[in-house]
Amino acid sequence: MSGFIRSRAGKAIGGIAAVGISALFLAGCTGTGGGGDASQPADQDRDELTLKIGTALPQTGNLAFLGPPEEAGVAYAAAQVNEVSDTTGLTLEVVYGDSGDTDNKAYETEIPRLLGEDVSAIIGAASSGTSLQFIDQVVGAGVIQFSPANTSDQFTTYDDNGLYFRTAPSDVLQGEVLGNLIAEDGNQTLGMIVLNDSYGTGLAKYVTEAFEAAGGEVVAAPTYNTGDTTFDAQISEVLAADPDAIALITFEEITTILPSLFGQFPADKLYFVDGNLSNFGDDFPPGSLTGAKGTLPGLSIDTISDFTNALDEFVASEGIEPLTEYSYAAESFDAVILLALAALAANSTDPADIAAKLIEVSGGEGDGEKCTTYAECAEIIIGGGVADYDGVSGPITFDEVGDPTEASIGIYQFGEDNNYAAYEG
């Protein structure tokens, strides 16, 4: 099995059961496609625009480890937009805020503060459950909500006034990939410890469907709530069921759960998800996680090394603390680039105007000219053409409800140092 899964609607290759979209094992390929002609007349009367966006990303809470890479991705994209503002006429301002989680509820004060800054869009939250707490407030104010990391299937059908978008794929895909991975590793029974929110229960549902479709049986799946600090009951229930493998569908609570599993369950039968896949390093004794695997939406870290290297250089130049994680940095970067391109295409910073152009600049209307940087895409737009941005995180290509129609899931494996790398099995 390769360490990278590329998906696109309409094909089923490699024995993966399709659920809405199918999976294709391609070991690090990126998507390309045909471009369109820049056939519109050049706009000779463009406005000078100042686009203001806010972020509600996890500076605190049970996904706080995702905050630094996501905010770095936003800042790096903003710098690239502003680098060519003299040419494009569009300047980007970012107001940073904290989403927190459903326990500390930082969003209750942060979202009103961001909306009070007259932003056109809010990037966030990372957690699906947290986003669901304030999506009505944001779109009800006529502002775009754009998440780089929400994966719950609830957003696909959510009544969002056409103002919600995301660069992360639905958990339909990650659940399918993880369930099949566990089965293909020879496991016949599975236990799960599951966060009781829209992300955790939704992902667990799709893992279960894929695993059972492959002939396996889920023998235990206890849940816990955000804010819980002890997990003895859940761990005991799963171990008592004597499963072949355990999937940990959690957020940062994983650091409390794992020590109770060490010595009681083989590490190479543990499976992680995007909410907890982290480089644990010296947090645990060497070899504690050797052989454990996990899934993470987005192109393989190896595949986007040019981006992460450039991001590291940017972070260093800005005096930001060096990154130790890169999860959803690319998706955050792409979210900002797409918003800026949509504003440029609309020649407006009005949220409704921007939302009306987001599908177009992502290539969702199928008639754009391919481009891979903000400057390149902006040149097409200013010249009167239609840009089709293929991002760092993938082609993206929004459908009519703001979901990406193409997605990638990386498979990773932990080494002796308790850090993960692309799985090459």
Image (tube, rainbow, N blue to C red):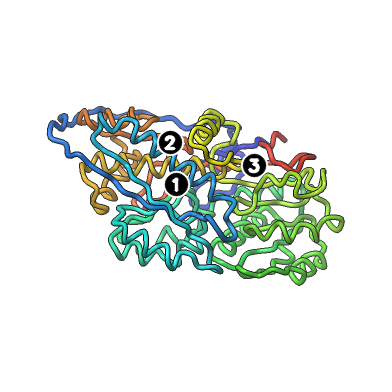
Labels 2, 3: front one = 2
In the displayed orientation, state which residue is furthest to the right: 263
In this figure, which residue is indicated by the disc labeled 2? 391
Rendered-image quadrant of the C terminus: top right
For the point 29% across and 46% down, the residue is 51
Rate crowding at label 1 as few (under 14), some (14 to 19) or many (20 or more) other CA atoms within 10 Å: many
Q: In this view, does 401 lie to the left or right of 230?
A: left
Count of numbered tags: 3
Give the class, few, some or many, for how many residues have Cα within 10 Å of label 3's Cα (few <14, many ≥20): many
Residue 23 on image: x %, y % = 55, 43
Q: Can the viewer see residue 146?
A: no
Residue at image point 28% right, 60% down: 142
- Quadrant assignment, res 35: top left
Q: In this view, does 132 lie above or below 337?
A: below
Label 2 to label 3, Cα distance in Å? 20 Å
Specify the amino acid type for callout 1: Thr
Taking the spot 74% from the left edge, 61% from the top edge, the residue there is 257
- Say which residue label 3 marks: 411
Q: Do the residues labelled 1 and 2 touch (CB within 8 Å)?
A: yes
Residue 108 image position (x, y, % from top left): 44, 68
Residue at image point 87% right, 55% down: 263
Is residue 406 depicted above or below 212 in this figure? Answer: above
Residue type marked 3? Ile
Query: N-terminal of the two: label 1 or label 2?
Result: 1
Task: Please tell me which residue lies in front, 110 or 171.
Answer: 110
Query: Which of marks 3 and 1 precedes in the sequence?
Result: 1
Which element is circle 1 on? loop
Counting from the top left corner in percent of width and height, residue 94 is at 37, 47
* Residue at image mark 1: 167
